[in-house]
């Protein structure tokens, strides 16, 4: 999609962080953007700020962990702009806990937002992108944690799922003139550690689902907090996503900081094949 001007994008988690960065970068390229977020105040502020730049943007509130709300957001987008060319599945949360403290509510919340909402986004918006015959792009936010899991918590599992889904969709949707990219950011200056502020009440009765509200009590919190506070500007990430859409990148990385860890994972996988290759066949 070399010429983005006049195209229409739908961006989830667009009230702040990476989502707002992407919405801003696309709007600056002449894209009409429907911003979607669960936080009404943040959404209103983001839309108002972009409109001050004469961007053609609008907003729709939705809890993407509820499929019906995502469908209503899609309907609102079509009613406002008449078409969709770009889907940015960006909304994400941290939450749940590691082995030994798992609960259904902890898994459900994180998987619903981070993975099921991505699946539903493709299911709902894919046909809309196909319908006009002009092609388009689907970008989904995973994480470097979707390539190098360091924990058994739902976040890493959900992000691996986003990577797998994106890789499969890229092959399947290419003949339909839809590109697919997966964003695997490193440390970005966002409010990801404050995800518990948006924990829906239907999950709130479970103490583990509420864990994000107590991140400052978790092991390693201070190091993670410092890394995020010193992280990359979300607007720069938005510019990377815009470039990726224009050039149909498969993987979008924000920096090379985690490249050695990813190389180590691939080396371990290769070593597993080498062990089998070198094994004396049984008779």
Image (spheres, rainbow, N blue to C red):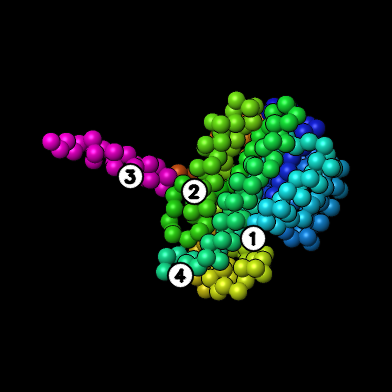
- Which badge, 3 or 4, comes first in the chain's sequence? 4
Q: Is residue 255 left or right of residue 198?
A: left
Q: Disc 3 to disc 4, how far (Cα)?
A: 28 Å
Badge 2 local density, few (<14 within 10 Å), some, or many (20+)?
A: many
Q: Secondary structure at mark 2?
A: helix
Residue linked to disc 1: 191
Q: Residue at x 74, y 40 (%)?
A: 9
Magenta segment main secondary structure: helix
In the rendered view, would you say 17 is above or below 176?
A: below
Helix, strand or loop under label 1:
loop
Q: Nearer the viewer, residue 104 or 12?
A: 104
Frontmost residue, 282 versus 97: 282
Label 2 and label 3: CA atoms lie apart by: 17 Å
- The residue singled out by tag 3 in the image is 268
Q: Earlier in the sequence, mark 2 or mark 3?
A: 2
- Labels 3 and 1: the sequence-earlier one: 1
- How many marks the image carries: the answer is 4
As measured in the structure, the alpha-carbon distance from the residue carrying label 1 to the one carrying label 4 is 24 Å
Q: Residue at x 60, y 56 (%)?
A: 112
Q: Nearer the viewer, mark 1 or mark 4?
A: 4
Residue 87 is situated, as x and y percent measured from the top left of the image, at 68, 41
- The residue drawn where x is 57% and y is 72% is 206
Return the residue at label 2. Answer: 160
Contact? badges 1 and 2 (CB < 8 Å): no
Kindly identify which residue carries mark 4: 101
State yes or no: residue 264 in magenta.
yes
For discs 3 and 4, the disc positioned in front in the rendered view: 4
220 magenta-colored: no
Residue 229 seen anywhere in this rendered image of the structure: no
Query: Taking 49 as reference, is 137 left or right?
Result: left
Write the start and end of the magenta stretch as one range.
260-283
Q: Is residue 186 left or right of residue 244?
A: left
């Amino acid at each position: 999609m070399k010429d983005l001007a006049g195209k229409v994008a739908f961006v989830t988690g667009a009230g702040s962080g990476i989502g707002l960065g992407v919405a801003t970068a696309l709007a600056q390229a002449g894209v009409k953007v429907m911003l979607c977020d669960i936080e009404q105040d943040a959404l209103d502020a983001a839309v108002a700020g972009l409109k001050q730049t004469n961007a053609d943007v609008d907003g729709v509130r939705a809890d993407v962990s509820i499929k019906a709300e995502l469908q209503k957001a899609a309907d609102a987008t079509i009613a406002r702009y008449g078409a969709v060319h770009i889907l940015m599945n960006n909304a994400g949360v941290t939450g749940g806990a590691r082995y030994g403290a798992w609960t259904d509510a902890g898994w459900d919340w994180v998987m619903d937002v981070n993975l099921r909402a991505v699946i539903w986004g493709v299911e709902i918006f894919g046909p809309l992108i196909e319908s006009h015959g002009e092609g388009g792009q689907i970008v989904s936010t995973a994480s470097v944690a979707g390539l190098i899991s360091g924990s058994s918590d739902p976040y890493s599992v959900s992000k691996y799922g986003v990577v797998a889904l994106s890789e499969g969709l890229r092959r399947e949707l290419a003949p339909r003139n839809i590109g697919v990219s997966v964003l695997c950011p490193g440390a970005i200056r966002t409010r990801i550690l404050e995800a518990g502020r948006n924990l829906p009440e239907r999950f709130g009765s479970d103490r583990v689902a509420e864990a994000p509200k107590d991140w400052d009590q978790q092991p390693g919190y201070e190091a993670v907090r410092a890394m995020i506070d010193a992280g990359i500007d979300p607007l720069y990430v938005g510019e990377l996503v815009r470039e990726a859409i224009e050039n149909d990148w498969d993987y979008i990385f924000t920096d090379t900081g985690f490249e050695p860890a990813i190389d180590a994972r691939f080396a371990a996988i290769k070593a597993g094949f080498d062990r089998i290759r070198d094994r004396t066949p049984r008779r």
